[in-house]
Amino acid sequence: MHMHEFYSDTQTRPTQAMRQAALDAPLGDERHDADPPTTELCARVADMLGMEAAVFLPSGTMCNEIAIAVHTRPGDEVICTRESHIIFAESGGPAALSGVMMCPIDVERGLLTPEQVRAHVRPASAHAPRSRLLIAEQTANLAGGAVWPVAQLNAVAREAKSAGLATHLDGARLLNAQVATGIPAAEHARDFDSAWIAFTKGLGCPVGAVLAGSRDFIADAWLLKRRWGGAMRQTGVLTAMCLYALDHHIDRLAEDHDLARSIGARLSELPAISKVHPVESNIVMVDLNATGPDARETARRLREQQVTVTVVGARRLRIVTHLDVGAADADALIAAMRKI
């Protein structure tokens, strides 16, 4: 039975052409820089992000956790927004793996301001943790895929760096921001010490993300990759698919954005929906009316009609478009919501 998967863009499957790229890839040992697709992918992503070097990792979460561990020491504090992925979806990794504290800031639509960063940097003191790292997320997932204006994003990074902090960009959907703004990813990451992009979301690959930074940063990242069990061998079977995605799946992200805007407009006409948050990329965030079923019950009823969505609040749902859903899936979603 066909499911209409709006749960996340992580629900994409590799296309047949991607799988063929994996079958045709020359392979070697990535740890000895002998796997051609992996070497090429890391070089291309480093260039895309304006960084010196990069490393292929199994997941974006591992990118974030390695970056935190490289940039901080136990007892340090990380400044981020309260709805950051590192807080809500990484299993307490910053505390468990790096021993750091989080300084979560409540913000509008996932976007910090330089003034907020300045207000939360702690003065040097033997009684308090050291403010050591700023993390921003482009796009802002739980803010409905909000796209940071590039000037604001880099102004926040510069403010943190002026206070002596390192800066890290969670780029899970950075290429969605690139497509939405028409501004290259390197400009988004310009004032950040490290950044990464995911291949398992809108780009449609089954595994992988690439973390980039200075050569020294990546040397330290490689140490942690091995220590945490992530060193691999013939990764070309994966990175060949990532290379295919870079060549064929970036520009088509605009189709996901168009579909998301269409879904948002159609949902706004339904009486069950009290609010559709601004749709800027491939995420539609909706609030349900107080008089109807709550988010969990609505998601359960949608699944009964072969439609999946994410529950992100008592009365809030997240709907994500990607290359494996199209107009017919959107029609099924709207029809199922009408029934509810």
Image (cartoon, rainbow, N blue to C red):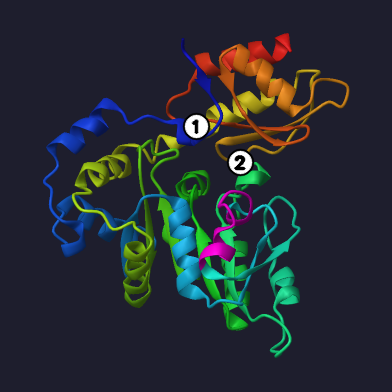
The spot of residue 154 in percent (x, y) is 56, 67
Q: Amino acid at mark 1?
A: Asp
Q: Could you say where residue 134 lies in the image, as x and y percent from the top left?
A: 59, 69
Mark closer to the chain start, 1 or 2: 1
Viewer-proximal residue among 9 and 331: 9
Report x, y in % for residue 174: 48, 51
Identify the amino acid type marked 2: Glu
Q: What range is drawn magenta here?
A: 86-97
Q: Could you say whether the residue bearing mark 2 is in a helix, strand or loop?
A: loop
Is 334 within the magenta? no
* Residue 184 visible in image: no
Whether the magenta-drawn stretch holds residue 96 is answered as yes
State the image quarter where residue 142 is shown. top right
Q: Main secondary structure of the magenta part?
A: helix
Residue 280: mark in rendering: 2
Q: Secondary structure at mark 1?
A: helix
Q: Is residue 12 above or below residue 4?
A: below
Residue occupying image coordinates x 47% and y 36%: 10
Using residue 55 as the reference point, say whether residue 67 is left or right of it.
Answer: right
Q: Is residue 28 above or below residue 49?
A: above
Image quadrant where residue 204 sits = top left
Badge 1 is on which residue? 256
Q: Alpha-carbon neighbours of circle 1 within 10 Å: few (<14), some, or many (≥20)?
A: many
The alpha-carbon separation of the residues under discs 1 and 2 comes to 11 Å
Q: Position of residue 288 (x, y in %)?
A: 79, 27
